[in-house]
Image (cartoon, coloured by chain):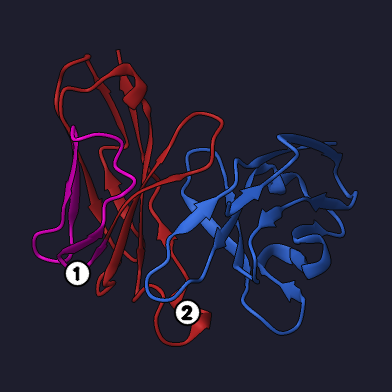
């Protein structure tokens, strides 16, 4: 497909369970972002990858959150021992090469549809 | 502190009426400014962006935005709203400071369009 895809689209987890959320970015996009969007809020930055390197993980709320992108394409966000406050929509976005080169294209992020996580 | 504010949580307009959504930022220089739209169950779609130059920016779907340095604002406008414009709109900002910079999103304005 041409766009960013995420799976699953919906996930219900019991408190304490581990979950893994997948993001397939646009082919060839170097930059990948994860965001958390709580109900009624704007997306909050979680982490940023350039290829397989995780350059910024300052937004991860706790050490229960872990993200990886081992081959520089697909990324997985893992949440261990889920808590109710983890309930949110998790958005993934990719960019050809974030923040470099021609300004007109280097600040375009393409978002996936998100994964809605509900922790019960 | 660097921040972005969308003062209106919810706005209702009649179909065919004009629309203005407000966005203000706090920063010592000119940031990079964006407007995104999010329809229910969809990811965010970029409407328009501003880096420098002409302060009136044209975007997709008939939207435009005007950067006003004196007011630290980047308000989104549309002359005539269509029912399909009902969605949530997010202003977003990059505060350039050299090297990598992440995006900060506002809290969003939900637009309702009535017949």
Q: Is mark 1 on a helix, strand or loop?
A: loop
Indicate left or right for A110 with A55 as reference: right
Q: Chain letter of disc 1?
A: A
The quarter of the rendered structure image containing the C terminus of chain B is top right
Depicted B41 relative to depicted A39: above or below? below
Q: Can residue B90 be seen in this view?
A: no
Q: Residue at 19%, 69% (x, y): give it.
A: A51
- Was residue A69 drawn as part of the magenta stretch in this picture? yes
Q: Categorize mark 2 by other alpha carbons within 10 Å: few (<14), some (14-19), many (20+).
A: some
In this view, the residue in front, B62 or B9, is: B9
In this view, the residue in front, B18 or A49, is: A49
Residue A111 placement: quadrant: bottom left
Q: Residue at 50%, 28% (x, y): give it.
A: A39
- Was residue A13 drawn as part of the magenta stretch in this picture? no
Q: Is residue A23 visible?
A: yes
Q: Which chain is blue?
A: B
1 and 2 marks on the same chain: yes
Distance, label 1 to label 2, CA atoms, is: 18 Å
Indicate left or right for A53 with B103 as reference: left
Q: Residue at 33%, 22% (x, y): give it.
A: A118
Q: Chain letter of disc 2?
A: A
Tell me which segment is drawn in magenta. A49-78
Depicted A120 relative to depicted B90: above or below? above
Query: Which color has been applied to chain A in this rendered view?
Result: red
Depicted B13 relative to depicted A50: above or below? above
Reading the chain from its start, which is encountered first: label 1 or label 2? Answer: 1
Which label number is shown at residue A105?
2
- Which residue bears the numbered disc 1? A51
Residue A18 lies, in percent from the top left, at 14, 26
């Amino acid at each position: 497909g041409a766009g960013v895809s995420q799976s699953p689209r919906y996930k219900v987890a019991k408190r304490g369970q581990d979950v893994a959320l997948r993001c397939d970015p646009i082919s060839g996009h170097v930059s990948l972002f994860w965001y958390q969007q709580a109900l009624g809020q704007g997306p909050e930055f979680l982490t940023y990858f350039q290829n397989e390197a995780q350059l910024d993980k300052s937004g991860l709320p706790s050490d229960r959150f872990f993200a990886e992108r081992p081959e520089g394409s697909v990324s997985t966000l893992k949440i261990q021992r889920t808590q109710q406050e983890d309930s949110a929509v998790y958005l993934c976005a990719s960019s050809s090469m974030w923040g470099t080169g021609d300004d007109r294209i280097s600040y375009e992020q393409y978002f996936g549809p998100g994964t809605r996580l509900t922790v019960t | 502190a660097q921040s972005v504010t969308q003062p209106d949580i919810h706005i209702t307009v009649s179909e065919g009426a004009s629309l203005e959504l407000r966005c203000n930022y706090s920063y010592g220089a000119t940031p990079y400014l964006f407007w995104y739209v999010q329809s229910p169950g969809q990811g965010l779609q970029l409407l328009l962006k501003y880096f420098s130059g002409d302060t009136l920016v044209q975007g997709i779907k008939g939207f435009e935005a005007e950067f006003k340095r004196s007011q630290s604002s980047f308000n989104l406008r549309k002359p005539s709203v269509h029912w399909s414009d009902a969605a949530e709109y997010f202003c977003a900002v990059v505060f350039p400071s050299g090297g990598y910079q992440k995006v900060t999103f506002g809290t969003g304005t939900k637009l309702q369009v009535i017949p």
